[in-house]
Image (cartoon, rainbow, N blue to C red):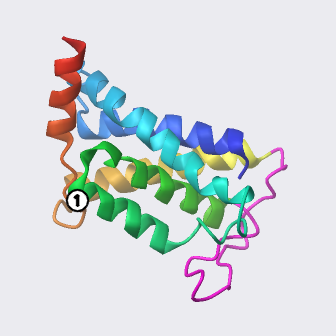
Amino acid sequence: MNKKDHILNGLLLGVGLGFVLHPEGSVQTLVTVAAVLVPVVLGALFPDIDTEFGKHRKTLHNVFVVAVLYGYTVYFSNLQWVWVGVLTHFVLDVLGSKRGIALFYPLWDKEFGTPVGVTTSSQYATVITVVITLVELVAIYALIHYLPGVVPNVDVASQVQGLQTLVG
């Protein structure tokens, strides 16, 4: 996917996560959207920094990057949602594009993708992005509400409380 579609995916996912975590549409929903939106969008853009150095779709497009960013949140809460954006970037590049990504780089150069993707310049790229984002949100909703023990515990309450303190 292209930069515009990764931004769109991050924005839709950030807003969607607010409603997945607080479906009642209350002030709590809006505060949650505010807490997750910017970090998710930044995470959705982060992997493409490797276009400036290293090998694109390899250097920052692998499971080790997600592991490091997720591990970082164990000690520092300021990047709690960035790894979600990075993960959704990977999902878009694997499912939505023809090329795929090297998930296990630098240990293995093989790029993983699906035959159903489109090129980044395709007129259908944005439609594919929206469809994949909706599927991601449905999957996240199902994991949180129907299989709660499967998803790592992300402490939304502390982030929301911190935002409420800032907002007043």
Which residue matches tag 1? 74
Indicate left or right for 60 with 18 as reference. right
Indicate left or right for 147 with 79 as reference. left
- At a point 67% along the width and 60% down the height, the residue shown is 50
The answer to which of 25 and 17 lies nearer the viewer is 17
Q: Judge whether 162 appears above or below 136 on screen.
A: above
| Region of the chain picked out in magenta, as a range | 97-123
Identify the element where label 1 is drawn. helix
Which percent across, then down, holds residue 118? 78, 59
- Magenta: main secondary structure equals loop
Indicate left or right for 86 with 121 as reference. left
- At a point 73% along the width and 73% down the height, the residue shown is 115
- At a point 19% along the width and 29% down the height, the residue shown is 162
Q: Judge whether 52 appears above or below 113 on screen.
A: above
* Magenta span includes 5: no
Give the quarter of the figure containing the C terminus.
top left
- At a point 36% along the width and 37% down the height, the residue shown is 36
Indicate left or right for 79 with 104 as reference. left
Which percent across, then down, holds residue 51? 73, 57
Q: Report the label total.
A: 1
Find residue 29 and report its image quarter: top left
Q: Judge whether 107 appears above or below 47 on screen.
A: below
Which percent across, then down, holds residue 167? 24, 14
**Could you classify mark 1 by the number of other residues whose Cα lies within 10 Å: few (under 14), some (14-19), or many (20 or more)?**
few
Find residue 27 and report its image quarter: top left
Q: Judge whether 96 appears above or below 19 on screen.
A: below
In the image, what residue type sits under mark 1? Val
Which percent across, then down, holds residue 102? 63, 77
